[in-house]
């Protein structure tokens, strides 16, 4: 799995999830439930991961949607 995005913006996480779902790209959102531990302060960013084989396509989908500036730098 590769991390393609890290953000505290829950609306952005939802939008990215919808875009990836629409492109049939399986993804995971990690640290989504950390708000219970942190007290809902939004300190811990959510991480969006995709399978290595889907990385390029996921980045293309998000770039086409105008979200290139939100993508993590590739290793």
Image (cartoon, helix red, strand yellow):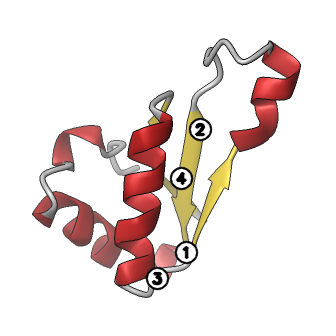
Q: Mark 2 points at which residue?
A: 46
Tell me if residue 16 comes above or below residue 13 in the rendering. below
Label 2 and label 4: CA atoms lie apart by 7 Å
Tell me if residue 52 comes above or below residue 48 in the rendering. below
Q: Which of marks 1 and 2 is nearer the N terminus?
A: 2
Number of residues whose C-alpha sits closer than 10 Å to that of mark 4, classed few (under 14), some (14–19) or many (20 or more): many
Residue drawn at x 58%, y 29% is: 45
Q: Is mark 1 on a helix, strand or loop?
A: loop
Tell me if residue 18 comes above or below residue 10 in the rendering. below
Label 4 and label 3: CA atoms lie apart by 15 Å
Q: Name the residue under label 4.
A: 48
Q: Is mark 2 on a helix, strand or loop?
A: strand
Residue drawn at x 80%, y 13% is: 39
Q: Which mark is residue 51?
A: 1
Q: Which of marks 4 and 1 is in front?
A: 4
> Pointer 3 and pointer 1: residues touching (CB < 8 Å)?
yes
> Pointer 2 and pointer 4: residues touching (CB < 8 Å)?
yes
Label 3 and label 1: CA atoms lie apart by 5 Å
Residue drawn at x 50%, y 27% is: 8
């Amino acid at each position: 799995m590769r991390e393609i995005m890290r953000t505290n913006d829950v609306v952005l996480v939802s939008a990215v999830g919808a875009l990836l779902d629409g492109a049939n790209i399986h993804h995971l959102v990690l640290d989504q439930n950390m708000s219970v531990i942190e007290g809902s302060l939004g300190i811990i960013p959510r991480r969006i991961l995709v399978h290595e084989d889907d990385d390029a396509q996921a980045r293309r989908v998000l770039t086409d949607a105008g979200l290139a500036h939100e993508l993590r730098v590739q290793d």
